[in-house]
Amino acid sequence: MKVLLTGHKGYIGAVAGPMLLTAGHEIVGVDTELYRNCDFGAGPQNIPEVHKDLRDLTRSDLEGFDAVVHLAALSNDPIGNLNPQLTYDINHLSSVRLARLAKEASVNRFVFASSCSTYGAAGDDFLDETSEQNPVTPYAESKGLAERAVAEMADDTFTPTYMRNATAYGVSPRLRLDIVLNDLVASAFTTGQILVKSDGTPWRPIVHIRDIIGAVIAVLDAPREVVHNQTFNVGRNDENFRIYELADIVAEVVPGCSINYAPGGGPDIRCYRVNFDKIGRMVPGFRPRWTARRGVQELYEAYQRIGLTAADIEKGRYVRISEIRRLQKAGELDSNLIWTSKYAER
């Protein structure tokens, strides 16, 4: 397939592009390069691209494609809380607009990267795709709103699929340290202390970014009738953990470190435990390969190899909200996260 990949230079996208190419797809990326100063190692592989903000895409940008894989978004809760309306504008309204443009341009498949965070404050019970959503942040709510709006466009010529990904982890050329497992390993490696910022009790399903992309590839390869207007939780049942369990795994893999709990860290209201049976049953091409322990080992070795330092963490280079604030303070980004003219073409 000829695939338009939005967010191809983000955390997941920088790995997705090469994996989709290896799977035999023709890829064109779309990215506004908010995180071009956040390379970890060699940086993303160059692929053909459209250098545009998601909000500026037109129908002509989508003509000739067989599928859109839509990863681009404001990526987490801190950014969502910085400007909630902007999160709704980009993650919800611009995603719906993109789907509409894709349909008008006769793109047949639309794969939307949603999130298990839409389940929100859910407790200890296992949740499947039919479970009630209870989002507690603008990020999570924006994803659910986009899912429901895009679903109304589905018809015989347009097949959307919604991938509710567990919390991502893993090494990427555009590393993030504002996601739980990456952060815990980074803390252990650079300081010898695994800092748990809550009381450690919330449930969190996790999934390696390569398994997320593997799920996307399996959906693109699946017969249309199998994935048409379907929602899939993406992960594996035995990779639901309480945060303190993840800290224990890190302590077992990274030598010479200990676990510390942040003073005053209470229970995180984001607590959800997810069932992933549906994607394994309906999309047999998807076989998740990664475990938390293997992922911790990968992260630890990458941090050693590339030389992650405590200074990198303190400067916030790999924390998305810190980078956004730095760019705004420097006058490179405006309040709507649009590059100022001086920096737009860098």
Image (spheres, grey):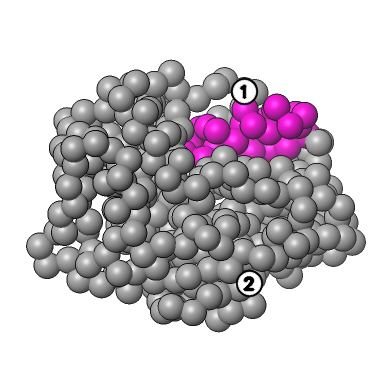
Residue drawn at 23 percent across, 64 percent down: 198
Q: Residue at x 34, y 33 (%)?
A: 300
Residue 285 visible somewhere in the drawing: yes
Q: Earlier in the sequence, mark 2 or mark 1?
A: 1
Quick one: quadrant of the N terminus? top right
Say whether residue 35 is left or right of residue 73.
Answer: left
Tell me what residue is drawn at x 44 percent, y 41 percent: 295
Which residue in the protein does label 2 denote?
Answer: 129
Q: Position of residue 175 (x, y in %)?
A: 39, 35
Magenta residue span: 2-31
Q: Residue at x 85, y 64 (%)?
A: 155
| Apparent side of residue 58 relative to residue 108 in the rendered image (left or right) | left
Badge 2 local density, few (<14 within 10 Å), some, or many (20+)?
some
On-image quarter of the C terminus:
top left
Residue 215 lies, in percent from the top left, at: 66, 48
* Residue 18 x/y as whole percent: 62, 27
Label 1: which secondary element: loop
Give the quadrant of residue 303: top left
| Residue 278 included in the magenta stretch of the image | no
Disc 2 secondary structure class: loop
Q: Amino acid at mark 2?
A: Glu
Q: Nearer the viewer, residue 10 or 121?
A: 121
What crowding class fits label 1: few (fewer than 14 Cα within 10 Å), some (14-19), or many (20 or more)?
A: some
Can you see residue 97? no
Looking at the image, residue 179 lies above or below residue 27: below
Q: Which mark is residue 47?
A: 1
Q: Residue furthest right?
A: 156
Question: How far apart are labels 2 and 1 at the CA level?
Answer: 34 Å
Q: Viewer-nearest of labels 2 and 1?
A: 2
Marker count (numbered) = 2
Type of amino acid at the residue the image marks with label 1: Ile
Q: Nearer the viewer, residue 331 or 41?
A: 41
